[in-house]
Amino acid sequence: MIKSLLSSFLLCVGFVAWSQSNEEAVIRQIFDHALRKGKSYEMLYDLSVNVGPRLSGSPGAAAAVEWSRQVMTDFGFDTVWLQPLMVPHWVRGQKETGRINSKRSGTVDINVCALGGSIGTGPNGIAANVVEVKSFDELKILGTKGVQGKIVFFNRPLDPTKINTFAAYGGAVDQRASGASEAAKYGAVAALVRSMGSNLEDYPHTGSMRYAPNVVKIPALAISTKHAEQLSRLLKEEPDLQIYLENHSVTLEDVPSYNVIGEIRGSQFPEEIIVVGGHLDSWDLAQGAHDDGAGCVQSIEVVRLFKQMGYRPKRTIRAVMFMNEENGLRGGLKYAEQAALKKEKHIAAIESDRGGFVPRGFTVPTDEKAKARVRSWKPLLEPYGLSDFSTEGGGADIGPLANQGVPLLGFLPDSQRYFNYHHTPEDTIDKVDKRELELGSASMAALVYLIDQYGLK
Amino acid sequence: MIKSLLSSFLLCVGFVAWSQSNEEAVIRQIFDHALRKGKSYEMLYDLSVNVGPRLSGSPGAAAAVEWSRQVMTDFGFDTVWLQPLMVPHWVRGQKETGRINSKRSGTVDINVCALGGSIGTGPNGIAANVVEVKSFDELKILGTKGVQGKIVFFNRPLDPTKINTFAAYGGAVDQRASGASEAAKYGAVAALVRSMGSNLEDYPHTGSMRYAPNVVKIPALAISTKHAEQLSRLLKEEPDLQIYLENHSVTLEDVPSYNVIGEIRGSQFPEEIIVVGGHLDSWDLAQGAHDDGAGCVQSIEVVRLFKQMGYRPKRTIRAVMFMNEENGLRGGLKYAEQAALKKEKHIAAIESDRGGFVPRGFTVPTDEKAKARVRSWKPLLEPYGLSDFSTEGGGADIGPLANQGVPLLGFLPDSQRYFNYHHTPEDTIDKVDKRELELGSASMAALVYLIDQYGLK
């Protein structure tokens, strides 16, 4: 009996040892392929430079749909298809104008841009006094008396002491998302929001804003962080200075667009699907190299690497280019709706939407068992710089799958430089390092490989 | 008795808990100061742009000595002094010329630069046939018959599959360091070495080379990685093409220079010294922002942060700007010689010379006890992205202190982008991210704080 137990134990240890070394070898192979013969950077160059900006509803977005359909077809994915949906169609219009009219300092041009979803000022613009606040609480204290007829200048910066810049962003973005309606409640005529950037910069950051129901809509614009500092200084000297703002943005009727989906079918459990995805749309001002061209090409690269290596997955691996993450999330919602309708069995969904920076780890599922499983792979992934498995959650596009009990994960690259470029004309291909991008693709492929082999439950 | 044991235990637990939380609070404070009111980037801008290139013996190096003396004096360090030494004085001379003369493709200009220490070709240059090799073994097989009278083209790239790019560099740099003398043994007239860069680039990377004793000296130049690929292709079509190389570099007499040292004296154990340092010299082609301006300003910032925070260290903290790491290591040797002569007690030395990139961890001492002590601090440092304590060793400049039994450590930032810029005109301030640099300074200060509090033995 003891002998038999012992031999079972040894068999077990033997299997684990073999299995571990096989996993190590496959993961090593994934990284070798990605770093020697990877296509991530070439794809991202093409998407960023030749397709370019691709806000939902724009010709660029339509071109990006066709681009990704073609790329996945050319790489010989088993199936590539378009999933139709309707998307919001917001258009910026001609370039915005921003100007400080000061009695003491004269006229000072300021770099501003409309926030996505904002209405326009009309061709005559808006000229008004300014009141600076750091929070909605301050706004409330000012009340209608202090705000009526003015432009509210929201000037709370990203907290530089947060090590994770996404936490800093999360602590400031309420101003961009809801500032206009909060200000309008007290009679403001426009909202001017300090850009969501980590540094002092010349260029404004766009990004989505929402109007609350039953509140008057007022224009909402972002101001560059440098000009936000300057405006704040000038306001201290001259509280009654005026600002002139002019933007021509407008929301048109919804238009048709698509998620773009490509997959290779599983050899053993083809009905079990692992989704790996990013979002195809970008802001109109940006090439969208980091946000989220990187996530798109990395997702395609996962499948392409498997094909190049001759690895035939047990489960179906599906690369999804979601449409409309930036200003509507319609792609993520449509994908989840269709998955439920077709009773598809998703065993995991992984999103890459934090830029093409050097890998740090993965965000993990909330389910305890799935989380423990992912963390148990740390020894296999740590040699590749993947050591952070501390955060739970997936990404915006895959979020709607949570209701169906799908374990959600996210690729976690380093966050330090993300908010230098986010939603700006600076989010260009030259800000992406080839090796960093390739390491990200390989990291995601390694994770997908482990999930394919062992599942999460 | 049990009661007394228990209360001792509780006291002990209580102290540990207090101590741990106190350490946490101080480290948090270090990062807050560095990220809110840090001077790292401002200093590095000044050193990179206003001082600029500073190869040993150059006017730039003399200016950098004065710059760092002034900066540490202005920050109110207790003592700032210059440590005299003699340094090699190699001068590049006028810009190099490189040209392929091909019967099939005509004349093709190639981007080349002399390697540091190389002799010149003379004003008439060198025109010769080329033989390409990937290793010294290949060279040996070719022998005098295959090499005599030719230019040897060393074309082994950095291995892209090494995750740590320093390992890839280590696997290729023998070609740069010793290629000329190895080739000269078989009668070569010059060595042309593929640049030590991670990517395909237009610009060549300089760096030091050494002539072996009793071997004829021949000129040694680097060629950009893109032109190395092109040359390799052309050689396949036309093995007897010619290359023309011209460089005017020369080694002059040694000249006086200095290490620059600043310290704050310890309050309890002033005779116990913790060194934190980088090297002040850079290559002549580069601003030396990452290599090693970053290490210099981070070392100064450690001490400045302590002063700003009002933290009075128990031990003496000494920031050392070593001279001549790039082509002689005379600064490191002089510092160790003087430390031995004065019987100074160094309890640790930490070098930052891997660029101003996002922190990953630290390299640790070889001594088992000291290594275990550093690794025991991981829980305190991991929240700041410092999770890699796997590698042993310090850095080149502090290396000579090893003989005196000083525990050596190194700051370990991410390595992916380092060899994009290393020893090239691209190593400029705009390649340094402000937050990444500041996080590095804070990381080093946190480590120095822990060593100051608890020692390493």
Image (spheres, coloured by chain):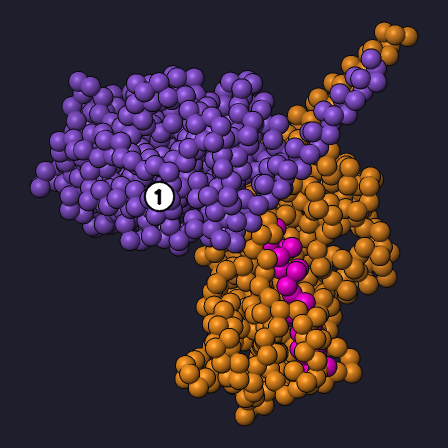
Chain colours: A purple, B orange
Question: Which residue is painted at 78% across and 14% down in the image?
Answer: B10
- Position of B442 with respect to A146 (left or right) is right
Amino acid at pointer 1: Met
Mark 1 neighbour class, 10 Å CA radius: few under 14, some 14 to 19, many 20 or more: many
Q: Nearer the viewer, residue A391 or B186?
A: B186
Q: Nearer the viewer, residue B378 or B195?
A: B195
Residue A6's x, y, as percent?
Answer: 80, 20
- Secondary element at image label 1: helix
Residue B173's x, y, as percent?
Answer: 65, 65
Residue A350's x, y, as percent?
Answer: 44, 31
Question: Which residue is painted at 43% across and 51% down in the image?
Answer: A39
Parent chain of label 1: A
Does the magenta-highlighted stretch encompass residue A81?
no
Residue B324 versus residue A226 in the image, above or below: below
Which quadrant, please, contains the C terminus of chain B? Answer: top right
Residue B62 versus residue A96 in the image, above or below: below
Q: Nearer the viewer, residue B304 or A264?
A: A264
**Magenta-drawn segment:** B164-185
Residue A351's x, y, as percent?
Answer: 42, 33
- Position of B234 with respect to B376 (left or right) is left
Instruction: Identify the residue position indicated by label 1 in the image.
Output: A72
- Position of A240 with respect to A345 (left or right) is left
Magenta stretch, overall SS? helix
Instruction: State the image quarter where residue A405 is shown.
Output: top left
Question: Which residue is painted at 13% across and 33% down in the image?
Answer: A252
- Position of B105 with respect to B6 (left or right) is left
Which quadrant, please, contains the N terminus of chain B? Answer: top right
Question: Which residue is painted at 50% across and 60% down in the image?
Answer: B199
